[in-house]
Amino acid sequence: MQGKVFKVLHPNDNFTLEADTFPAAKEDVYIVYGDEPIYGDKMETGYDGFYRFKYLTKGTYKVYAYNTLTDARKVAVIDTVTVADGETKNVQNIYIHEGKSYETSYIKGNVNVKYYNKGSWYPQSVFAAYDVRAYIRIKGAAYHFDEARTGLDGAFVFQNLKPGTYEVFVFSEVVSTEVLYPVVQEVTIDSAGVIKSINTPFLININV
């Protein structure tokens, strides 16, 4: 029985969720004989991700390698293979996943700003808000657990999020008093491995 293992790397700050895939060298591959409760043998892949288990009798086997999750847990990727007498069975490729952004999601949004001074608005009504802090908290929580700054285009990204409902907010000013107040949008992530875009940009007021 032979095959290859490929590693799918999910690096942090990967805002497209596109992962890098390459041969998994020096990864342990395990084989389970029949219905045994634990593996019967293991071997290490070569530089090209290749492995081979030799001298097997005919029968059904399980072969697996491990994903590495963000919390350091390992979860097996398993294939079941039946081998006949005298057969060299090529196993379908095994893909294992690793990286801080694996099984996490992103929330992306934009902030626009209207500038004013002494109650008078600037001629161009709306600008992309650069270097403005955006905050995120779990819905109903008193305080935020992360913050991000907007770029030149007013965009921000929160990463490494699990499924759940969040409140994303930025601060605006009351024009008459310059008192800050939060502008909040609720965002729900239904599953892992998605990019959730906030469709309506935040609009804030800033005195200059």
Image (cartoon, grey):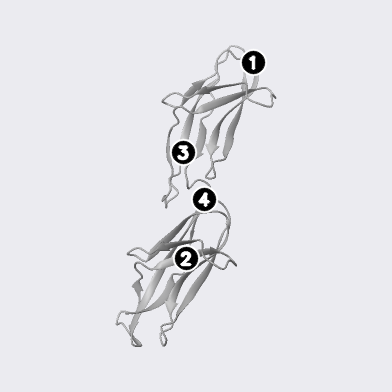
- The crowding category of the residue bearing disc 3, from other C-alpha atoms within 10 Å (few below 14, some 14 to 19, many at least 20), is many
Would you name the residue on which mark 3 appears?
8
Could you tell me how far apart the alpha carbons at marks 3 and 4 are, in whole angstroms?
A: 14 Å
CB within 8 Å, label 1 to label 2: no
Q: Inspect the image, locate mark 1, and give the three-letter code of the amino acid beneath it.
A: Lys
For residue 104, the mark is 4
**Which of the two labelled residues, at mark 1 and mark 4, occupies the earlier sequence position?**
1
In the rendered image, which quarter is residue 38 located in?
top right
N-term-proximal mark, 3 vs 4: 3
Element under disc 3: strand
CA–CA distance between discs 3 and 1? 32 Å
Q: Name the residue carrying label 2.
A: 135
The structure residue drawn at horizontal position 51% and vertical position 36%, both measured from the top left corner, is 96
Of callouts 2 and 3, the N-terminal one: 3
According to the picture, the residue beneath numbered tag 1 turns out to be 58
Task: Name which residue type carries label 3.
Answer: Val
**Sequence order check, earlier mark of 3 and 1:** 3
